Image: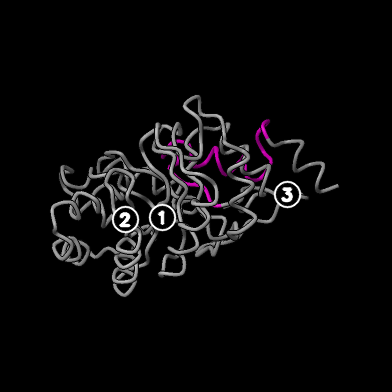
């Protein structure tokens, strides 16, 4: 949706986007809030994550998922829910839950549990026969620092196993994994990952505006970004297009 003409803006991919994806996070919106959000932002949200295991305690879950589906926005349950089923040896139950709620996406992660990586890749392979798989790399434990070479291997192995995209972990606060506790980007890690993993295949969790700006300046308007708060979806789109002060001159200079 564009309300008037502005020349020399960066070109955005269009839905269904192969990249340039915005993954937003629903941490407990009501059905009415979802309907309101979809009325304004459905064109800018490519996939909506129901954060961690919030779907377990969400009233009117089917009505909520239907509101997203009607707006053309696919949903998935957060990776922590997958982990909650796995640690209880309930993988088949998890697959039945995906079917019950007509899910077309699923997230495979191991941020809260210890999971053999070959086994994780096997879960990706199995689930990719059923749904589109997003796999998350990185730990939710701020003390656990994964070296760059391991990030690269994990990401490439999981893409090879059948993941559509790999997600760089940051939690909803943006203060672990790809980021220091202050929220500052681990720039060396990001740059090293990009030498071996195509940027189109990575969704960078970037809930903070400064993090979004960093990745857009580094990789352009069509970088994949995740864990975006619902009320930040339209602001993010303006950052992507150079229509907010943070990236205004960056794109203006490129388009001259």
What secondary structure is marked by label 1? strand
**Which element type, helix, strand or loop, lies under badge 2?**
strand
Residue 79, percent across and down?
A: 30, 50
Tell me the element at label 3.
Answer: loop
Q: Among all residues in the image, which is located at the extreme right?
A: 256
Q: Is residue 100 left or right of residue 144?
A: left
Specify few, some or many for label 1: CA neighbours under 10 Å numbering under 14, 14-19, or 20 or more.
many
The extreme top residue here reads 182
Residue shown at the point (63%, 56%) measured from the top left:
12
Q: Earlier in the sequence, mark 3 or mark 2?
A: 3
Where does residue 81 sit, x and y in percent of width and height? 23, 49
Foreground mark, 3 or 2, reads: 2
Residues in magenta, as a range? 224-246
Q: Which residue is mark 1?
A: 47
Compare residues 29 and 7 and report the one nearer the observer: 29
170 up-or-down from 200: above or below? above
Count of number-bearing discs: 3
Measured Cα–Cα span from mark 2 to mark 1: 8 Å
Q: Quadrant of residue 143?
A: top left
Mark 1 or mark 3, which has the lower sequence index?
Answer: 3
- Residue found at x 62% / y 53%: 194
Measured Cα–Cα span from mark 1 to mark 3: 24 Å
- In the rendered structure, find residue 76 and report the number of the disc placed on it: 2
- The relative height of residue 95 versus residue 152 in the rendered view (above or below) is below
Quadrant housing residue 249: top right
In the displayed structure, does residue 47 sit left or right of residue 215? Answer: left
Query: Which mark, residue 9?
Result: 3
């Amino acid at each position: 949706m564009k309300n008037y003409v502005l020349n020399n803006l960066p070109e955005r991919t269009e839905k269904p986007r192969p990249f340039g994806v915005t993954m937003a996070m629903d941490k407990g919106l009501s059905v009415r809030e979802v309907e309101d959000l979809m009325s304004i932002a459905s064109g800018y949200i490519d996939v909506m994550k129901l954060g961690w295991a919030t779907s377990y305690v969400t009233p009117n879950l089917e009505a909520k998922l239907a509101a997203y589906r009607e707006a053309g926005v696919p949903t998935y349950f957060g990776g922590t829910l997958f982990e909650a089923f796995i640690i209880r040896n309930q993988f088949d139950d998890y697959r039945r839950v995906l079917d019950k709620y007509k899910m077309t996406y699923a997230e495979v992660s191991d941020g809260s549990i210890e999971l053999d990586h070959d086994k994780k890749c096997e879960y990706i392979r199995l689930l990719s026969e059923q749904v589109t798989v997003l796999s998350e790399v990185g730990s939710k434990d701020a003390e656990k620092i994964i070296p760059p070479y391991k990030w690269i291997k994990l990401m490439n192995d999981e893409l090879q196993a059948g993941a559509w995209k790999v997600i760089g972990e940051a939690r909803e606060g943006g203060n672990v994994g790809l980021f220091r506790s202050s929220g500052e980007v681990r720039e060396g890690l990001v740059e090293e990952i990009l030498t071996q993993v195509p940027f189109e295949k990575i969704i960078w969790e970037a809930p903070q505006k400064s993090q979004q700006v960093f990745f857009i300046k580094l990789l352009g308007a069509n970088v994949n970004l995740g864990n975006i708060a619902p009320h930040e979806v339209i602001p993010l789109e303006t950052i992507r297009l150079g229509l907010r002060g943070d990236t205004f001159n960056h794109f203006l200079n490129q388009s001259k």
